[in-house]
Image (cartoon, rainbow, N blue to C red):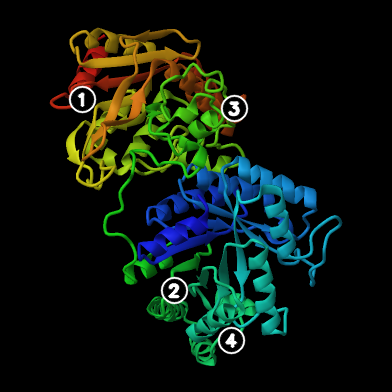
C-alpha cells in the first residue's frame, strides 16, 4: 500500500501517526538483532518504516534485503531510500525493479551524500544529478505504482545558502511526482512551522511530516546537528554544560524532544517520523509519554500478515513454518495457486522447491553460536541440553526457531522442558485453547468480541526407539493424530487430510482457520527441517570433529514428528507424552 494513502486514511480518522527510520548495520549479527528489534517495535503499529541507503550506495544490497524482510516477513509497510550517489541509471532501474518484485511500493527519492572520503558530491558516469531526476525516472518507468517521498529542510539545506531556493526546488520535486515530504531533524518548533507556512505559500499542498531525532549522547548530538541549521543556542549551551554526564545529557534530551513532539501535535501536525538510530527504548518511551500507543495492540492473525500486496488475501498457513516465516514466504512467493487466498493446494510445483537459502544461518558466526549451542558437543545429552536451555530461556535461538519462545508457550514451558529432558527435541508447539477472548494478551488475535481456539500441538525430533513407543501408546488415545518422517522419507501417519489446529469465531464473520497441519506440506518442510541440522548447526564445527559427526548422525537417524490432540476442550496431550516416556523407559 502506498504511504500517501495510509496518511490520508489516518488523517480522515483524526489520528496522529508515527513512523520509524532504520539504517543497515555493519555486521550480520547486527542485522539479525535489528530484525528482532524491528519486530518488537512493529508491535507499536507504526504507519510505516523506512530504511536508509548508505552513502555512495555502500549498503545497496543489504538495504534491499532488509526492506524485503520488513515488508514481507515483519508485515510493516516499508519505504526504501534510494540515492543518485554512485548509481548509474541502469543500477537505479535494477534496484527499483528488485524492490518492486519484493513488494516494496514506496521510495524516498534523494540525491544522496558524497561517498566516504569524498568532500563534495559529484554525478557519476551515466548517473543522475538531483533527486528530481530520480523522481522523474521512477514516474516515467513505473507510473503511479510507487509512492514517492522526498526530503525537506526546515531552515534550509546546509549546502545551499538560499532558503528560498530550497523551497522552490522542493516545489519542483513535488510537481514532478512526490507524494509527501519528510523533514530533516530540528529542535525548534517555530522553524518547522515557518517552513510549513512557506511551503504552503508557494503552492506545496502535500503532507509534510516532521523528522524527530532523540538525543542519545553528547557525541551524537554534535554529529547530527552538523546537518541541522538553527539549533537554538539555549539547547547547545545547556548540553555543553553537561556534556561529561551521559545520563544528564540523555535525560535532558528526552524531555527536550518530548516537549518538541507535544508542541508539534498541539500545532496540528499529522504525524511524527522518528530517526531511531536503530535504538528502541527512547522512542518507545516517547510514544508512551505522548499517549500515542494504542491501548490494545492485537494480532489480526496468529501469524504476522505480510505487507506485500501479493499476499493480502492470505488467511491460511501450514504450522510447520510458524517459527521460520521468512523461509515459508520465500517458498511460496511465486506459488501459482496462492492468489486465491486459500492455502489449500500444496500440489503447486512452485511450492515444493527448496529455493530459499536457509534464512537462519550460523555460517560466518561460529563463535556466537558455539557460545549458545556448545563449544564441542560430543553426546546426545549435550544436544538435549541445548533444547532444554532454549525452553528455559537461557539461550534465545535454535536453528528451527528464529527467536525466543512466544509468550503463549509460558503455560506449557515446564512440559516442553520435560519432553526435551527425555529426548524428544521440540521445535514447535502450542497449548490447547478453548474459547479464549480474542483480546487475550498471550493467545488472542483477530477482531474484538471474538473467541479463539487451538488444538494442542507439538513438533519434535526423536529416534526410532522413542517413535516406536509413541506408535504403541497412540492406539490408546483416539484423539491423537500424528505424522512422522525421517530424512529418506520412511514415514508413519494416522491422518491423511488437512487438519485445522487454530481457528477463530468473530461477530459477523465466517469461522477463520488460519493455521493447519497438512501431510503434503509436512513432506516439503521435512527437507528444510533436516537440512538445518547440517547447514546451521554442524557447519560451525570442523568436518573431522566429533561434534560434526554427532550432528550428522542425528541428521541421518532421527525422525521429524508432529502430534495433534484434537480434543481442544478436555484433551491432555501431556498425559499422552508421559505414557510415551514411560513406555520408552520400560524397554
How dense is the environment of label 1, judged by Cα within 10 Å: few (below 14), some, or many (20 and up)? some
* The label number, if any, that marks residue 405 in the structure image: none
* The label number, if any, that marks residue 574 in the structure image: 1
Which sits in the foreground, 77 or 362?
Answer: 77
* The label number, if any, that marks residue 355 in the structure image: 3
Say which label, 1 or 2, has the lower sequence index: 2
Distance between mark 2 and mark 4 Cα atoms: 20 Å
Q: Judge left or right: residue 392 versus residue 206.
A: left
Say which label, 2 or 4, has the lower sequence index: 4
Q: Secondary structure at mark 3?
A: loop
- Check whether the beta carbons of the residues at disc 4 and disc 1 lie within 8 A of each other: no
The residue lying furthest to the front in this view is: 203
* The label number, if any, that marks residue 230 in the structure image: 4
Q: Judge left or right: residue 454 versus residue 133.
A: left
Residue shown at 71%/80% (left/top)?
A: 165
Q: Nearer the viewer, mark 3 or mark 2?
A: 2
Say which label, 4 or 3, has the lower sequence index: 4
Residue for badge 2: 269
Question: Residue 299, can we see it?
Answer: yes
Question: Residue 425, can we see it?
Answer: no
Q: Judge left or right: residue 545 versus residue 337.
A: right
Which sits in the foreground, 549 or 348?
Answer: 348
How dense is the environment of label 4, judged by Cα within 10 Å: few (below 14), some, or many (20 and up)? few
Distance between mark 3 and mark 2 Cα atoms: 45 Å
Say which label, 3 or 2, has the lower sequence index: 2
Amino acid at each position: 500500500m502506498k504511504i500517501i494513502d495510509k496518511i490520508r486514511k489516518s488523517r480522515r480518522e483524526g489520528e496522529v501517526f508515527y513512523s520509524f527510520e532504520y539504517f543497515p548495520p555493519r555486521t550480520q549479527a547486527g542485522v539479525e538483532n535489528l530484525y528482532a528489534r524491528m519486530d518488537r517495535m512493529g508491535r507499536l503499529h507504526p504507519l510505516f518504516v523506512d530504511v536508509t541507503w548508505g552513502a555512495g550506495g555502500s549498503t545497496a544490497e543489504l538495504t534491499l534485503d532488509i526492506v524485503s524482510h520488513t515488508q514481507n516477513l515483519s508485515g510493516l509497510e516499508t519505504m526504501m531510500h534510494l540515492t543518485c550517489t554512485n548509481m548509474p541509471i541502469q543500477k537505479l532501474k535494477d534496484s527499483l525493479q528488485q524492490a518492486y518484485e519484493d513488494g516494496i511500493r514506496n521510495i524516498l527519492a534523494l540525491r544522496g551524500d558524497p561517498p566516504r572520503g569524498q568532500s563534495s558530491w559529484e554525478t557519476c558516469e551515466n548517473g543522475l544529478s538531483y533527486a528530481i531526476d530520480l523522481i522523474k525516472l521512477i514516474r516515467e518507468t513505473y507510473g503511479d505504482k510507487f509512492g514517492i517521498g522526498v526530503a525537506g529542510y526546515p531552515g534550509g539545506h546546509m549546502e545551499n545558502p538560499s532558503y528560498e531556493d530550497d523551497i522552490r526546488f522542493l516545489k519542483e520535486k513535488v510537481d514532478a511526482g512526490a507524494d509527501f515530504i519528510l523533514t530533516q531533524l530540528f529542535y525548534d518548533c517555530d522553524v518547522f512551522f515557518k517552513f510549513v507556512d512557506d511551503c504552503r505559500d508557494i503552492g506545496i499542498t502535500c503532507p509534510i511530516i516532521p523528522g524527530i531525532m532523540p538525543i542519545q549522547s553528547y557525541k551524537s548530538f554534535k554529529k547530527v546537528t552538523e546537518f541541522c541549521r538553527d539549533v537554538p543556542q539555549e539547547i547547545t549551551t545547556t548540553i555543553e554544560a553537561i556534556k561529561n554526564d551521559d545520563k544528564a545529557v540523555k535525560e535532558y534530551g528526552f524531555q527536550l524532544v518530548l516537549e518538541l513532539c507535544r508542541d508539534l501535535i498541539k500545532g496540528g501536525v499529522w504525524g511524527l517520523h522518528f530517526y531511531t538510530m536503530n535504538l528502541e527504548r527512547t522512542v518507545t518511551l516517547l510514544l508512551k509519554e505522548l499517549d500515542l500507543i494504542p491501548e490494545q495492540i492485537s494480532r489480526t492473525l496468529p501469524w504476522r500478515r505480510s505487507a506485500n500486496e501479493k499476499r493480502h488475501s492470505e488467511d491460511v498457513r501450514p504450522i510447520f513454518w510458524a517459527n521460520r516465516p521468512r523461509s515459508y514466504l520465500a517458498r511460496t512467493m511465486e506459488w501459482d495457486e496462492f492468489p486465491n487466498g486459500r492455502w489449500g493446494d500444496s500440489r503447486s510445483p512452485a511450492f515444493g522447491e527448496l529455493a530459499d537459502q536457509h534464512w537462519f544461518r550460523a555460517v560466518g558466526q561460529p563463535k556466537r553460536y558455539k557460545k549458545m549451542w556448545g563449544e564441542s558437543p560430543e553426546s546426545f545429552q549435550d544436544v538435549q541440553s541445548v533444547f532444554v536451555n532454549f525452553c528455559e530461556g537461557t539461550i534465545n535461538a535454535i536453528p528451527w526457531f528464529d527467536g525466543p519462545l512466544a509468550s503463549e508457550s509460558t503455560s506449557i514451558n515446564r512440559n516442553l522442558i520435560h519432553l526435551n529432558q527425555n529426548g524428544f527435541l521440540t521445535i514447535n508447539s502450542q497449548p490447547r485453547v478453548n474459547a479464549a477472548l480474542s483480546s487475550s494478551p498471550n493467545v488472542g488475535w483477530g477482531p474484538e468480541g471474538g473467541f479463539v481456539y487451538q488444538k494442542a500441538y507439538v513438533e519434535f525430533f526423536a529416534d526410532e526407539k522413542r517413535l516406536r513407543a509413541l506408535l504403541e501408546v497412540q492406539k490408546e488415545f483416539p484423539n491423537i493424530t500424528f505424522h512422522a518422517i525421517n530424512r529418506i522419507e520412511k514415514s508413519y501417519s494416522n491422518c491423511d487430510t488437512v487438519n485445522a489446529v487454530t481457528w477463530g469465531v468473530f461477530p459477523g464473520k465466517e469461522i477463520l482457520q488460519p493455521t493447519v497441519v497438512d501431510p503434503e506440506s509436512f513432506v516439503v518442510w521435512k527437507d528444510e527441517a533436516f537440512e538445518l541440522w547440517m547447514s546451521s548447526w554442524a557447519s560451525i564445527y570442523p568436518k573431522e570433529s566429533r561434534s560434526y559427526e554427532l550432528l550428522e548422525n542425528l541428521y541421518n537417524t532421527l525422525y521429524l514428528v508432529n502430534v495433534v490432540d484434537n480434543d481442544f476442550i478436555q484433551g491432555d496431550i501431556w498425559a499422552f507424552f508421559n505414557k510415551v516416556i514411560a513406555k520408552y523407559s520400560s524397554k
